[in-house]
Image (cartoon, helix red, strand yellow):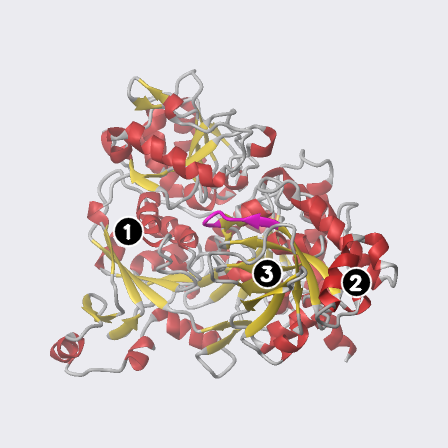
Amino acid sequence: MVKLYGNGVYLVNGTKIIEDNAEAGQALNAECGSVPSKEEAAKGTIAYKILEEHNTSGDMQNLNIKFDKLTSHDITFVGIIQTARASGLEKFPVPYVLTNCHNSLCAVGGTINEDDHMFGLSCAKKYGGMYVPPHQAVIHQFAREMLAGGGSMLLGSDSHTRYGALGTMAVGEGGPELVKQLLGRTYDIAMPGIVAVYLAGKPQKGVGPQDIALAIIGAVFANGYVNNKVMEFVGDGVANLSADYRIGVDVMTTETTCLSSVWVTDSEIKDFYEIHKRPEDYKELKPDNIAYYDGMVYVDLSEIKPMIAMPFHPSNVYTIDELNANMMDILDDVEKKALVSLDNNKVQFTLKDKVRNGKLYVEQGVIAGCAGGGFENICDAADILRGKNIGADEFSLSVYPSSQPVFMELVKNGVIADIMATGATVRSAFCGPCFGAGDVPPNNGLSIRHSTRNFPNREGSKVTNGQIASVALMDARSIAATAANKGYLTSAMDIDAEFSKPKYYFDSTIYDNRVYNGVGKPQPETEIKFGPNIKDWPVMSALTDNMVLKVVSEIHDPVTTTDELIPSGETSSFRSNPLGLAEFTLSRKDPAYVGRAKAVQLGEKARTAGEDIFAALPEAEEVFKQVNAKFEAKPEETQIGSLIYAVKPGDGSAREQAASCQKVLGGFANIAKEYATKRYRSNLINWGMLPFIFEEDKLPFKNGDYIFVKDIKNAIINKEDVIKAYVVGQEMKEFDLKLGRLTDDERDIIVKGCLINYYRAQMQA
């Protein structure tokens, strides 16, 4: 079904695979009459060519990328623009699109969400951007319809920024990386590895894009096969997939932890651009006759069956047939895995009570967002449901078309009427079901969703309040089959349905009439509209020669998601209020964290105000006494802050707040065995936090310990590989930390204290 190559591969003429081994040279010579070097052949990938066109450094090993376009939604754009304003923003230098699809439900938080929307509209006018009002489109569908272009690059402040199927290399990053682009700077990374995803064959009837995506995620997530690499989709099977189908696979590549994605393009994608009235944005993309990849994921589409990703991760995958055949064993395994994520004795998690007469019953189905809400997914679901009903029991079904143009076409061709006739409800374009702000199931409920993630709390329950519900990811077709079976888990391959495949007609009138487009037409005289919840970032201190850090949270889960670092859901109403949002930090993982961090922060606040540090933080007196018994560290010249330890933090969302909330509470560092994603590590750096690495399993410190980091400022400036740290006590136990690769700018950002300080210093120079 899915095979991972152990070595790099040469792809010849787009179809012939030659693995990089002892026989590779002979095979290449026989096939091509020549044997290029890996370095030369690597230049033949689609990704290399796009990166080369956008790199400004002149060094393809160390890239300085300038993106063509930027996009953000209403959970992130306020913080981004506020940061950019504090750093000297005058106008948007490239098209920047502000969508409103996450905080669309303005009933939550009083005026907070709509205040953010008005802030966005006024900034689009003032700085020359584009503003998409609430309910018009989810961020990624609008980007597909209106922004993507063959061979272009797009940066978004949402982790599922993926438009590779349309020939666009898109990257989802934390807000500070967009700030850099808004200020005319670059996205600086080492040349990423490029892994081919070879698609062969044709999917079976009833198998949808989510099934293909989950099969790939299950094969590559745990082993990190594509971590921080670019996935390049090639192979003869690509031609057997519609544009909508490719998009549905592509958006889920984020869950592999890859950096970006790109696909070969063909007449199917050319038609997509013509349908969307942008034929000039199509570009044929394909690898050279000989292209070298750092690895290959080989996918036989014909062997993939309908899949389900069980709680609590998209990589926890089984076929639906496998689950139905081995139900109790698999549910037992799911419960054991869940203990890692639900380390809270307030809830008792089980799915075995869902088994009725040997079948798994679910309470809810949702088809939504950038993954599930596409035209083809909803049409196929309607074909399965036509003439049936979802019943009057606990099971419910809701469908969210991904944009108003998609919704309008579904109305015109009768699909919406067919879906509503079953008892299902149809909603506007909204991302809420993907992050726990829409369609919350009952306590102990199980929801099957064609959306992007199924981490704990993504459906809206609160474990710390004794609530627990679960999400399993499935394709829209099998969700519809389950709905037709009134809530009993069913594979779409078990339903006899004819798929009508109606043609899609895109009508841009909605956008023409409703979307504000001020790109390239800034109006500096426009006054920005600030609601009472929109707050400036607090002042952040610069790095000192030495640091004293208290460990205030210790997490030993194999992976810690950004949802656990800063929860999604109702907290989104405070995304424009750094201090308000920070109160939720780690609230569902370590509820005592905020209090511990704020207690330590009192010492730093006293230090920067020139007040009595020991009066503010009495325990610091003994800490400095122990430190100064061996070293010299003046309290008034030494930063005092908190840190968290996590084995592998940062999987999931691009949200910068996973880092900035720690910094707002006085957090100055993370220590990790490794970082799950490049974007989370970048968020730490951009907020002036030290991304320490400690690779050993046995920790020299524990929660509550103070750590003294000696000569940290010099170590960063002088690019030292090893940082000396000491567990504070009579013995001052020494251990080594590492920081990994840092660019010169990243070092300067950390020294200055954060990205805002870094740019402010440049303005004053």
Q: Residues within 10 Å of mark 2 (few under 14, many from 20)?
A: few
Give me the C-alpha separation between circle 3 and circle 1. Answer: 36 Å
Please name the residue that numbered disc 3 is placed on. 683
Three-letter amino acid code of the residue under disc 3: Asn
Residue 467 image position (x, y, % from top left): 55, 28
Please name the residue that numbered disc 2 is placed on. 525
Q: Which mark is drawn over residue 241?
A: 1
The foreground one among 713 and 257 is 713
Comparing labels 2 and 1, the label whose residue is closer to the camera: 1
Q: Which residues are magenta?
A: 553-559
Q: Secondary structure at mark 3?
A: helix
Give me the C-alpha separation between circle 3 and circle 2. Answer: 32 Å
Comparing labels 3 and 2, the label whose residue is closer to the camera: 3
The foreground one among 82 and 385 is 82
Comparing labels 3 and 1, the label whose residue is closer to the camera: 3
Q: Residues within 10 Å of mark 3 (few under 14, many from 20)?
A: many
